[in-house]
Image (cartoon, rainbow, N blue to C red):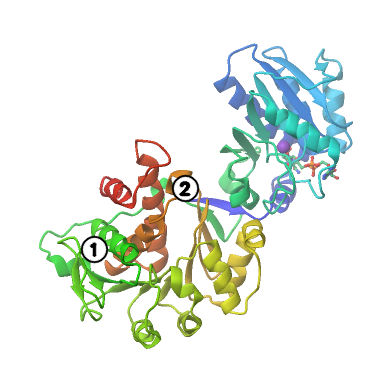
Amino acid sequence: MQKIFDEVNSLDKRSYEKFFLTEDILMEHAAFSIYTYIENNFKKNSTILIICGSGNNGADGLALARLLYKKFDIKIYLANEPKSSMAKIQYERIKSLDITISEKLFEADILIDCLFGTGLNRSLDENSKTLISKLNSFNSFKIACDIPSGINNVGQIENIAFKADVTITMGALKLSLFSDVVKDFIGDIQVSNLGIQREIYETQTNKFLLELSDINLPFRDKDNSHKGTFGHTNIIIGTKTGAGIISCDSAFAFGCGLVTAISKEDLDLPYHIMQDRKISKNCTSIAIGMGLGEYEKNEIEKILETDILKVIDADLFYEKLLLKYLDDKVVLTPHPKEFISLLKLTNTDEISIEELQNNRFLYVEKFCKKYPKVVLLLKGANVIIAQNEEIFINNFGRAVLSKGGSGDVLSGLIASLLAQGYDRLEACITASLAHTTASNNYPKNNYSLSPQELIEEIKKL
Ligand SMILES: NC(=O)C1=CN([C@@H]2O[C@H](COP(=O)(O)OP(=O)(O)OC[C@H]3O[C@@H](n4cnc5c(N)ncnc54)[C@H](O)[C@@H]3O)[C@@H](O)[C@H]2O)[C@@H](O)CC1
Ligand SMILES: [K+]
């Protein structure tokens, strides 16, 4: 996993003080990393337009222009006069070069957005909005320097943002690159080295970006085993039976030795799924909530009271009785609407979906502070997995997963791993990565994936 920081100004400051790296040195490395990216990916003499603002993001662009000059056909567009001291210095450095300052925007092969970086601290003015909108309309390859202009320090977009194909971010990953609302604006992310290896530039953090290598699939190193060796999960089937049955199937596919559907009605189940009326004696995990619908409250209580690890999902986030069980036995897997209900039930906050989606990390942190024993998995374009003060982000998800039943598959995967002995965080991390990876491996298109096909892809991981 990679470290993520709420802000990097303190890291820059530490580099000046601890390693005697000046702002100038850091900036030269920032510019050089974009130069290297362009050199490695584009033909000599490609046309490049660098759009520069008045601060240090613009200064990065001016330094980059100096580096690219003569190897590429470059022009600078000055959105504002250089104002920060580094922008003025960088401007001096290019004055004697014959670099064209373009008076207008045009569709170059490559556009480089150096308008605003981490200094964006107020709403965009009309000129900036028009400028960004025009840039977005061009068919050029688009590179954002540090962060696409228009995204603020907490990952919100008030009006418009530059729509990058790649964001080359300076020094370390910033949290603002991982809100759901910026997902379609940042493109691929690359981290630039600022004159010292990233592991030295970076300090301690409590936030992490998951990588594919963080997956820890079920592993069998004992052949002297039987079905009981690999756990027994119980999935509670509610009035909407399909949801729970999907979870049963995905739990079985992800290695759990035994899967029992707990249901009052006789169900038409796949042959490998057992059925019972009550929780099995040797049950090692439970999943409850998916398609629950009408269910007797005292029966739910009896299940929640058990000392068994549980995945709690969907309809249960609207039940007040859940409040007694927000402890070290549970994993909660709400989607945004369900999380809002949970925030309300727990008297944490009463907010709209929009407010949540604009501040996902803030509300996850608030909730986890209040319930530090709970493991929370907040669904969304970027999945957030959190416990106490730690946050893990899975940004591999794509639109292919935006289908009914995807969440039921995920509940089954987590329950399966809990039953097999994973701890709750490990189970969420591996299940979430398996879920996104399998969906991305679906070969057909990004709209037709069914839960069954998703489970088939999970079997191939
Ligand atoms: N501090 C450092 O050591 C380094 C900084 N670097 C670059 O510096 C950037 C940050 O530079 P700055 O702090 O100068 O800020 P920016 O260049 O991001 O912002 C420029 C200026 O725009 C003004 N501004 C903010 N919001 C505005 C709005 N909505 N409309 C009009 N003007 C607005 C601000 O007052 C600020 O002075 C980083 O994103 C990165 O690109 C890199 O060179 C790496 C090293
Ligand atoms: K930028």
Q: At label 1, which amino acid type do we have?
A: Cys
Q: Earlier in the sequence, mark 2 or mark 1?
A: 1
Residue at the spot 21% in from the left edge and 66% down from the top edge: 230
Note whether residue 368 is visible. Answer: no
Residue at left offset 41%, top offset 49%: 436
* Residue ID at (55%, 52%): 3
**In the foreground, 229 or 23:** 229
User: Which amino acid does the dot numbered 2 rest on?
Assistant: Gly
Count of numbered marks: 2
Disc 1 crowd, CA 10 A, few/some/many (<14, 14-19, 20+): many
| Residue 194 is at least partly visible in this image | yes
Q: In the shown orientation, is residue 362 left or right of residue 407?
A: right
Residue under numbered circle 1 = 256
Rendered image quadrant of residue 205: bottom right
Q: Quadrant of residue 206?
A: bottom right
**Residue at position x 35%, y 75% in the image:** 309
Seen from the viewer's position, the closer of residues 346 and 267 is 267
Pointer 1 residue Cβ closer than 8 Å to ligand 2: no
Q: Which mark is residue 397?
A: 2
Residue 12, given in percent of the width and then of the height, sits at: 72, 47
Disc 1 on helix, strand or loop? loop
Instruction: From the viewer's perspective, tell me whether residue 345 is left or right of residue 65.
Output: left
* 3D distance between C-alphas at marks 2 and 1: 24 Å
**Residue that extends furthest to the left in the rendered view of this protein:** 224
